[in-house]
Image (spheres, grey):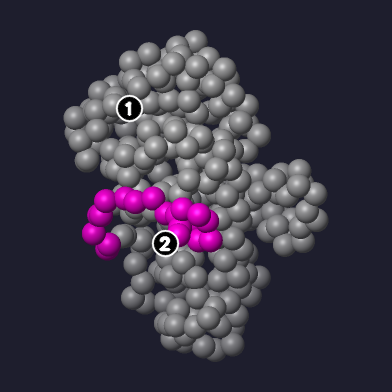
């Protein structure tokens, strides 16, 4: 299978790197020619355009910063979609939008999958990230070998659009964790706690989380670098709010979280690193929440292993 990959940013560059590292016949495209050149130097082919990739590849993956960007790329690719072509949307996007774009692909005889990832950029870099995939089962079985080259745990979530819903659900939870970690660390500092000790106390307690064990470390280091920015957080929790609104769920926490990040963007800029949401409380208290011995960025020390399908608990396939 020849694969095209559009979008070589923080996440896309790492996912496409896993494909190249594992010997996949890969063509790449990005608006930044230096990113493309870096992949060509490693053995990839430069795609002239999204249209060219859809013409010359069996599957085209998009990993882009917004639904609008995905739509623009799809409009270029769509004339060249037909039977045997697969579009794989790995961006974090809106359920309704991925269904709309995927419907266009299906109407022309192609197959469409929404397959966002979860687990942090550092795990995307090593192929140990989780991947959700929304599509019919036949298409899932066809692309599963490819997904296993990019991720460790692969979950078939159901029909097209289901993966995008679950992705924004998990990003909502991660954002809630980030805000509570920031509040906890600043409160520990204000209460006179040693922050190294406070970090370990939370880590070994019932209050720990993946976010604490990753983002709290870069908060305490002071770099606040998790390769994710405030505008992307605002987009993701906004998409979660839209899911809840369509389903008629009167959320209470998420609207407050949106206000918190809108305030962070107003203060520090939309491209500020997302863990720097802690600065709102640092500024309010005059405290500096840093401690020695923490890394400036996260790295994955798990060895790369073959991916596998996760079977949901309680289903017939789990028996």
Image quadrant in which the N terminus is located: top left
Q: Main secondary structure of the magenta part?
A: loop
User: How far is disc 1 from disc 2 in space, using C-alphas?
Assistant: 35 Å
Local crowd size for mark 2, using a 10 Å CA cut-off: few (<14), some (14–19), many (≥20): some
- What's the magenta region? 301-319
Mark 1 / mark 2, whichever is N-terminal: 1
* Residue under label 1: 3
- Point 59% across, 24% down: residue: 103
Q: Position of residue 161 (x, y in %)?
A: 59, 38
Q: Secondary structure at mark 1?
A: strand
Image quadrant in which the C terminus is located: bottom left
* Residue under label 2: 223
- Between residues 241 and 180, which one lies in front from this camera angle? 241
Q: Can residue 300 be seen by looking at this rendering? A: yes
Which mark, residue 300?
none
- Point 32% across, 27% down: residue: 3
**Residue 310 part of the magenta-drawn span:** yes
In the figure, 175 relative to 105: above or below?
below
Select label 1 or label 2 by which is in front: 1
Q: Secondary structure at mark 2?
A: loop
């Amino acid at each position: 299978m020849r694969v095209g990959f559009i979008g070589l940013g923080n996440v896309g560059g790492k996912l496409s790197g896993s494909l190249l590292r594992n010997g996949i016949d890969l063509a790449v495209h990005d608006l930044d020619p230096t990113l493309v050149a870096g992949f060509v130097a490693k053995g990839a082919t430069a795609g002239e355009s999204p249209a060219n990739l859809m013409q010359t590849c069996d599957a085209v993956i998009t990993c882009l910063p917004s639904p609008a960007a995905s739509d623009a790329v799809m409009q270029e690719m769509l004339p060249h979609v037909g039977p045997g072509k697969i579009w794989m949307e790995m961006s974090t996007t809106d359920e309704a939008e991925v269904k709309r774009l995927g419907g266009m692909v299906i109407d022309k005889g192609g197959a469409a999958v929404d397959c966002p990832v979860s687990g942090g950029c550092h795990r995307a870099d090593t192929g140990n990230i989780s991947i959700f995939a929304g599509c019919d089962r036949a298409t899932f079985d066809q692309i599963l070998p490819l997904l296993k080259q990019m991720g460790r745990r692969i979950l078939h979530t159901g029909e097209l659009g289901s993966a995008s819903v679950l992705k924004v659900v998990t990003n909502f939870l991660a954002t809630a964790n980030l805000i509570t970690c920031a509040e906890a660390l600043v409160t520990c500092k204000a209460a006179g706690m040693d922050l190294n000790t406070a970090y370990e106390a939370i880590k070994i307690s019932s209050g720990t989380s993946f976010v604490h064990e990753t983002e709290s470390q870069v908060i305490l280091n002071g770099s606040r670098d998790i390769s994710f920015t405030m505008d992307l957080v605002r987009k993701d929790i906004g998409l979660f709010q839209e899911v809840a609104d369509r389903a008629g769920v009167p959320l209470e926490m998420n609207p407050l979280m949106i206000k918190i990040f809108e305030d962070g963007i107003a203060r520090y800029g939309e491209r500020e690193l997302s863990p720097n949401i802690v600065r709102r409380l640092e500024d309010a208290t005059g405290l500096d929440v840093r401690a020695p011995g923490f890394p400036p960025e996260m790295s994955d020390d798990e060895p790369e292993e073959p991916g596998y399908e996760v079977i949901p608990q309680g289903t017939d396939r789990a028996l």
